[in-house]
Image: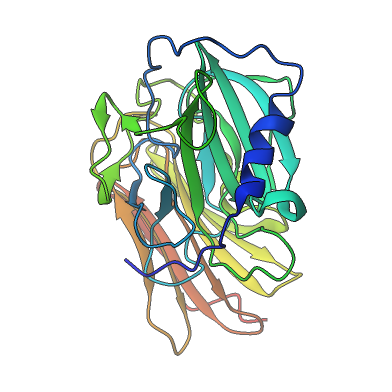
Amino acid sequence: MRKRRMLVLTVAVGGVVAMTYAGIGVANAAGVRPAFQLPFPCGQTWNGDSDNSSAHRSWEIDFNRGSTADADYGDTVVASAAGTVLTSANQGSANGYGNLIVIDHGGGWRSYYAHLSKRSVSQGAHVAQGQKIGEVGNTSKPGNNISPHLHYEVRTTDTSYPSNIQRAYFNGTVFGYPNQTLRSNNSCSGGSTNPYTATEICGDGYQVIDQAALGTAGRVYLLYNASNGRNCVTTVKQTGIGSATGTTTAYLEVKGKARTTDSGAYGYYAGPVRAAAENTCVKWGGAVGSNSYDSPSEHCG
């Protein structure tokens, strides 16, 4: 995985604790740890790193997937456990976290999701485990140039910062510090309706310009963002929702460039696969199991 450039957090980060928790009772001790899952949709694979930044306190994690610096920009971030949104704000100037979501899980446990490009929930909202709360980004304080990633923390309220930062557990197992690649089991319980849409997966500004059915198993979508000239492809499952079985694939090939593919045993969708393709022909497609679609070279204007 690629290296991350992170901001240097100062004691001002402690201000998040004081500012975020103002007027909220602090537990004397943390209760039973919630059943945390990876903060990404079912079946996705992400690499977590805790030692590749001078800014890191013990047990904080930066998450990425993909092979380029912005490969996961705009990818969906979900709640690692159910709870109430304590903070939903851009705190970049105060502490460098940029767009920050903090979820209170009860019993003195809270989870942090920083540098988001987009926040999808508001303060006071109750969120279910696996519910979308934002998108991966690189927001921070002015002048802080960082690559897109999700900065994730788990804290308790039984002591002060930074000793309240706890080891992260996913699916009942402690994260393999300092670096581990994990597959998400978040909300892999099945269901009849896919909760994700193509435009939600690809992000703000993207509009569907073409699509193809993959039998009854799913549908692959081609989207375009007129503001930045980028295409996006995602394959959305329509059967076996939430079950990370079989292989779901999405790919995008811009004329003259190598094909980019996302493929795995995903519970909900493959992708998003994005690339600049203004006034350039593309090939696109995807598959769910044995059902596949491969486009000709098209959408050249």
Asked if residue 111 is positioned above or below residue 223 in the image, the reply reads above
Nearest the viewer among 93 and 101 is: 93
Screen quadrant of the C terminus: bottom right
Residue at figure coordinates x 51%, y 30% from the top left:
111
Q: Is residue 13 left or right of residue 234?
A: right
Residue 42 is situated, as x and y percent measured from the top left of the image, at 37, 35
- Here the colouring is rainbow
Screen quadrant of the N terminus: bottom left
Asked if residue 54 is positioned above or below residue 219 in the image, the reply reads below
Residue at figure coordinates x 42%, y 37% from the top left:
268
Residue 47 is situated, as x and y percent measured from the top left of the image, at 33, 53
User: Is residue 127 at all visible to an observer of this figure?
Assistant: no
Residue at figure coordinates x 55%, y 11% from the top left:
27
Q: Is residue 212 left or right of residue 239?
A: right
Residue 103 is situated, as x and y percent measured from the top left of the image, at 59, 26
Q: Quadrant of residue 146?
A: bottom right
User: Is residue 215 at all visible to an observer of this figure?
Assistant: yes
Nearest the viewer among 266 and 3 is: 3
Q: Quadrant of residue 65?
A: bottom left
Q: Residue furthest bottom?
A: 256
Asked if residue 230 is positioned above or below residue 243 in the image, the reply reads below
Asked if residue 200 is positioned above or below residue 47 in the image, the reply reads above
Q: Quadrant of residue 261?
A: bottom left
